[in-house]
Amino acid sequence: MQDRYPDPETFSAGVLYESLGKKLALDSMTGTRGYNRMIVSPDISRPGLCFSGYTHKFMHSRIQIIGETEITLLNQLSQKDRTAAVANVYNFPVVCCIVTKGLSPPEELVSAAQESDTALFVSPQDTTPLIHDLTDFLGEVFAPHVSLHGTLVDIYGEGLLVMGRSAIGKSEAVLGLVERGHRLVADDLVRVRKAGNRLIGTGDALIGFHMEIRGIGFVSIPELYGVGAIKEMQSVDLAVRLLDADLVDETDRSGLAEKHMNILGVDVPMVEIPVLPGRNITLLLEVAAMMNIQAKDTGCTSAERLNRKLIARMGRNRLRE
Amino acid sequence: MTEKVITVPNKLGIHARPAAMIVRVAVEFDCEIWVESPADRVNAKSIMGVMTLAASGGTSITVSAEGREETEAVEAIADVIRSGFGEEMI
């Protein structure tokens, strides 16, 4: 998996080459022509039928994968028919084409791509694995995403999204976690995207792993704490809201009432921690993460287990009477 | 010192959630408040304490208070318990 994915708003054929060209071993036959064409669909298309003349419902806005079938078809045609077959496809504003398996595209195909300013890539990779890698990548690029104001940290593999008003102490608390050996994923701005039913968070490429600590300024975490203190991406498993003490609803002190935060349609378990002077927020975040891990492992929270024991004891007391 | 005897009216008794409700009311008062079952006497402001009573439905418990607004405190706690905590009654 990639660490960061391009923004779908600016995802063009050129961006595809920059971000995936190495992995798919792409080589452009058309220089940088067609690099500004926008890719708007996470799907791919095989243009075989369109080459052969059935142009109805041709998905020209998708990336076209030209494999052995298509190339064999084109090669067995006369030059005139080949030109016509290629035109069937290039009469449409095709996004870009990838010829796979190290096959050489016929001259007519290359010139049609050049004339229409469409990128034509070749790759030595086999068609099916290339399609798998490409659709995985496109799926990630076009996944629903949102930018959140908060800090994402990995505690024993559990992704904690720490949120709260500015200056409530998110960064300081997370700095404490880093000091205790946990890993920073993103500070202040977390980009969250939905992958299946999971949420994956990363930081902003420019901010990197800097944290802004009031009174000190920007702190580079990997420079101070080493690369072990950072992580490129992390699932979001638990949301923690740090709240001013007077804003917290104290109805539930037992931890029995489960709260959730909806992010991109996914319900993430949430805890609300009242911030009071002298409270060790770092420690509380660590405990919250460990409790969430335990709840997932055992299927219920420790509050539920305790309560069940209590109710069982009351039942026994009643029997004795 | 003010005292009141109440019967726990809900089926499940004072488990975690009801205990939290009692404590939430108790901490609003300045006085000392206790809850007493035949077996034990605990601080009404301690959630662990109140849970330890393991007071099942139908148990008689005594709420007592001493200090500022002790009458109001006992009445407030008694109200919460009498309400059955919004749960199924016996």
Image (cartoon, rainbow, N blue to C red):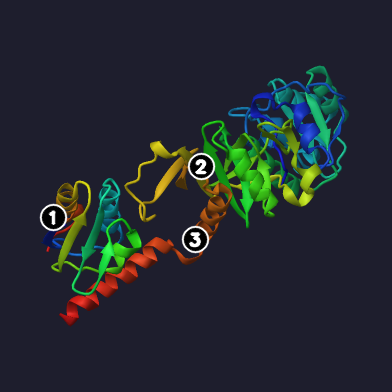
Residue annotated with mark 2: A277
Chain of the residue that carries numbered disc 1 in the rendered image: B
Reply above or below: B80 against A48: below
Residue annotated with mark 3: A296
Badge 3 density bin: few <14, some 14–19, many ≥20, Cα 10 Å: few
At mark 3, the secondary structure is helix
Alpha carbon of mark 1 to alpha carbon of mark 2: how far?
A: 37 Å
Q: Residue A274 sits in which quadrant?
A: top left
Q: Nearer the viewer, residue A294 or A283?
A: A283
Q: Position of residue A33 (x, y in %)?
A: 82, 21
Residue annotated with mark 1: B82
The answer to whether residue A300 is visible is no
Q: Residue at x 71, y 38 (%)?
A: A4
Q: Position of residue B12 (x, y in %)?
A: 21, 65
Q: Position of residue A300 (x, y in %)?
A: 42, 62
In front: mark 3 or mark 1?
1
Q: Nearer the viewer, residue A27 or B34?
A: B34
Q: Amino acid at mark 2?
A: Pro
Q: Are marks 2 and 3 on the same chain?
A: yes
Q: Are marks 1 and 2 on the same chain?
A: no
Q: Are marks 3 and 1 on the same chain?
A: no
